[in-house]
Image (spheres, grey):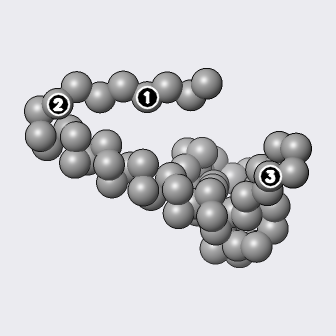
Amino acid sequence: MNSIKLTPTEVLLQVAKSRPFATAIRSGKTEWSYAALWQRVRELANKIDELETSGRPIGIYMG
């Protein structure tokens, strides 16, 4: 039995590495591959890091 627990981010990275061009998200006519989704996650993480070190408040709207 595998007792190692992965975070959603770790799972996303694993799938992005193994199947980068597979569809991760589909909404209407819009599709994102796992590679594109991973890239966007990294961009957001980097932006949050920048804001955090600047002392500015951080808020994320996911509507």
User: What residue appears at the point 32 percent right and 49 percent down from the top-left corner?
Assistant: 47
Quarter where residue 55 is shown: top left
- The residue beneath circle 3 is 30
Q: Residues within 10 Å of mark 3 (few under 14, many from 20)?
A: few
Disc 3 from disc 1: Cα separation:
22 Å
Question: Element at badge 3?
Answer: strand
Q: How crowded is mark 2: few (under 14 residues within 10 Å), some or many (20 or more)?
A: few
Proximity of marks 2 and 3: CB atoms separated by less than 8 Å? no
Q: Position of residue 25 (x, y in %)?
A: 77, 50
- Please identify, in this view, whether the residue under mark 2 or under mark 3 is nearer the observer: 3
Amino acid type at mark 2: Arg
Residue in the foreground of this view, choosing between 14 and 5: 14
Q: Is 47 situated left or right of 13 in this image?
A: left
Which of the 4 quarters of the picture holds residue 62?
Answer: top right
What residue is at 43 percent from the left and 28 percent from the top?
60
Q: Is mark 1 on a helix, strand or loop?
A: loop
Secondary structure at badge 2 equals loop
Decide which of tag 2 and tag 3 comes sooner along the chain.
3
Cα distance, mark 2 to mark 3?
33 Å
- Indicate the amino acid at tag 1: Ile
Residue under label 1, please give it.
60
Residue appearing at x 22%, y 40% in the figure: 51
Question: Residue at 12% across / 40% down in the picture?
Answer: 54
* Position of residue 16 in the picture relative to residue 45 (left or right): right
Residue 5 in view here = no
Numbered disc in front, either 3 or 1? 3
Numbered tag placed on residue 56 in the rendering: 2
Residue type at mark 3 is Thr
Q: Residue furthest front?
A: 29
